[in-house]
Image (tube, grey):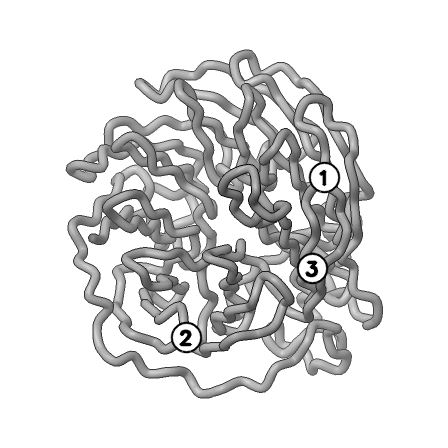
Amino acid sequence: MERAAGVTWRLAGSWILLTLFLTGCSSMPGWAPSWMGGKDEKKSTAPVVPRQPVQVAEGPTGLQLMWRKSNASLHDWRGGGEPSEHFEQPARFVVTDGEAYVGTFQGRVVKFDLKTGSVAWSVQVGSSVMGGVAVDEERVFAGTEQGEMIAVKRSSGELVWRTRVATTVDSAPAVADGKVVFVTLDNRAYALDAVTGKRLWMHSTTAEALVVMGSATPTIADGLVFVGYSSGEVYVLRLADGNRVWSDNLRVLGGSSELDMMQDVDASVVLSEQHGPQAAPRRAFMANHQGRLVAYFAATGSRIWEKKLSVVRQPLWFQGRLFLSDLDGNLVAISADDGVELWRAHISEGMLTTPVIFKDKVVVADNKKNLFTLDPASGRLLGRDAVSGAVMSLPVVDDRALYLWTNGGELMRYE
C-alpha cells in the first residue's frame, strides 16, 4: 500500500496484526486518510504548512545526460508490469573508483562500469534487497527481505558470506573499521565482522506494530554509530561494542489514529563537517516523519534547537545550512546554527529525493520523473528536466558527475 506522495507503510510483528490491518484497509475505517480512501476524520499530529503553487522552472537544468543504462534482468519480475508500478528500488547505491553498485527489489546486486555504463556483473543474492548496498575495499554488502546480510566480492560478485538475523534487514548497511552495521524491521541494530560475517554486537529497542517501510541507514563517525528506530528513539552507540553513549526520543505526542502512532526516524542522521582541531563541536541533526527535527551536540546529546518539520529523506548539510525535502514536495533551507527557516520552495506534486550539491546548485529529483536545480542562496528554481523514470533513490555525486538510479532500474550519468 503506497501513500500518494510515495511513502510506503509496512506492518511489523505478528501475523494477527497484519490480518487486522489488511482487513481494515479493505473497509477503509474512519481513521484512514483521504489518500487511502478514508474521510480524514482524525488529523495527523504532523505540522501543516499552507501549500504554495508549484514553481515554474526558468528552463532546463543545463546538466547533460551522458548515458543511461539498464540491466535487462532487472525487468524480469515475477509480479509482471513495470517495476515502478508496485515496488520501490532500494534507496542507496554506491559510486566509487569508477564503479557503481546497486541492489534491486528483484534480489540482485549489480556492478556497472562508469566509463561506459555497461554491466560488469549481476548476481542473484536471494529475496528483495532492502535499503541498498555498501562497499569496502573488497566486498559489497546487501541485506534482504528474508533477514540475511550478504557479502559478495567487488571483483566478481562471488559470494563471500551470508549471515541470517532475526527478521527483515530494513536499512542499507554502513561500513567502517571492519564492521557492517544495519537495522532490522523489529528495531534491532547489528554489527557484523566485514570479513567473516560473524555477529559482533546487537542493540535493540521496542518493536512497533505499524511503521513506515524502510529504516534509516546508520551514520558512523568518530567511533560512534547514530541509529534511528521506528519507535521515534535515536541512539548513539559505540562502534567498538554497541554500548549506549546517549539517546533521545523524537516521539510527537497527541493524535488518536493509527497513523499518528507512526513515529519512525527514517531519515539518516546528518552530521556537520569538521575541518581542523579548532573546528566547532560536531552537531547531529535528526528528524522523524511525524514532524520533529532536532539539532544536538553529537558527542553529548545536548539539544541545541528543535523545529516542526516532517522528513523521511536524509537532509543535506552544506556550508552551515540544512536542505531538506518534506512530504509535500517542498525543498526547505534551514540555518544549521539556530533552526531558522531561510526559504521554502514548492517544486513538485510528488515525493522529492534527498537533495545534493552539484556544480554549485542544489539538485533534487522526484517520483514524477523530474530533475530540478535550485539556487542554494535563495531557493529560486533554476531548471527542470524530464527523466526517463521515477527517481526515489538518493542521488550520488562524485568529482565529475551526478548519478541517478530510477525505479525502473536505469542508471543515469549527468555532467
Secondary structure beneath dot 1 equals: strand
Residue at image location 29% in from the left, 48% down from the top? 410
Q: Nearer the viewer, residue 273 or 256?
A: 273
Residue 236: numbered disc? 1
Give the x, y percent position of residue 222.
Answer: 61, 33
Q: Nearer the viewer, residue 126 or 49?
A: 49
Label 3 amino acid?
A: Val
Report the number of discs.
3
Give the x, y percent position of residue 238.
Answer: 71, 29
**Sequence-wise, which precedes: disc 3 or disc 2?**
3
**In the image: residue 24, left or right of residue 53:** right
- Is 73 situated above or below 304? above
Secondary structure beneath dot 3 equals: strand
Return the residue at label 2.
Answer: 379
Secondary structure beneath dot 2 equals: loop
Give the x, y percent position of residue 35.
Answer: 59, 75
**In the image: residue 272, left or right of residue 358:** right
| Residue 271 in sight | yes
- Is 386 situated above or below 288? below
